[in-house]
Each structure stands twice: as structure tokens, then as C-alpha cells.
Image (cartoon, grey):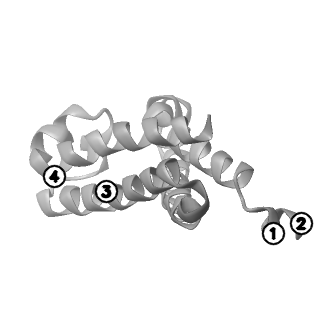
Amino acid sequence: MNRWITALLAIVLGGNAVFQLIAPLAWYDAVPGVPATGAYNPHFVRDIGMAYLVVVLGLAWFAWRPRQGWPALVCAAAFLALHAAIHIGDGACGASPLSDFIRDFPGVFLPALLTVWIALRSRPAVLRSLT
């Protein structure tokens, strides 16, 4: 089940990354809340698209070969969790934190939560024995 979820996340987040790289202005205009974060910067949108491609590679590696890909999954989970933390901080300082959280939940928080959960559940037996 974990492999299927990470494969699905890789496909969805990969589609987002490709959208960012191929059509950064269309992506900027299409994703709710993004224009509120500042002026459009195509270089920045593409940089984030590349970061998401690295996340996708980590997810896909784990989906394909869980034992070998687990460290890459942890890196993907770290990026997604830190990205979500930025959204929490920004939302807490905003005028409508709850609506920001609800808006960002499917695209930011849910992938982070799922990836962290899978990484923790899938950690190698050696690491589980240390806890």
C-alpha cells in the first residue's frame, strides 16, 4: 500500500513540477493562493519545479525499490514537511489562517503528511530497534 501511495504522489507532484517548468506563468495564475505570495518570478517558479522533481525521484525510487529508496523518501519527506512548515508560518501571520490552511491542505499539507507517515512506517528494522 505504501508503494502505491508514493507512486500516486510521484505522479501528481510530477505533473505539478512539469507544469511549473513548462508553463510557469500559467501555473502561477492557476494555483490558488500563489499570486498572494508575491510578484511572479519565472526563475523562482522553475526553481521550485526542479525541487519538486527531486521529491518525485525520491518518491518514485521508494515506490520501485523500497529498501534502497527509503533514504530518498526521507529526503522527499523532509522537503515536503519543511515546505508545509513555511505555509504554517505564513498562514499564522496572515489575515485568515484557517482559510489558508484549508486552501493549502490538498496540495501542501496532505502530501507532506502522507510522505512523512510512510517514511516513518517504512523505516528499516535496524532503525526501528533503536526507538
Q: Determine whether label 4 and label 3 are within 8 Å by CB.
A: yes
Q: Earlier in the sequence, mark 1 or mark 4?
A: 4
| Element type at mark 2 | helix
Task: Tell me: residue 43, above or below residue 59.
Answer: below
**Foreground disc of the pair 4, 2:** 2
**Foreground disc of the pair 1, 4:** 1
Amino acid residing under circle 1: Val
Residue 129: image tag: 2
Task: Tell me: residue 93, above or below residue 111.
Answer: below
Q: List the residue tagged with mark 1.
A: 126
Q: List the residue tagged with mark 3.
A: 53
Residue 88: image tag: none
Q: Earlier in the sequence, mark 2 or mark 3?
A: 3
Residue 21: image tag: 4
Classify mark 3: residues with Cα within 10 Å, few (<14), some (14-19) or many (20+). many
| Element type at mark 4 | helix
Residue shown at 26% from the left, 61% from the top: 50
Question: Residues under labels 3 and 1: Cα distance?
Answer: 29 Å
| Element type at mark 3 | helix
Image coords of residue 111 (percent x, y): 51, 41
Residue shown at 10% from the left, 44% from the top: 23
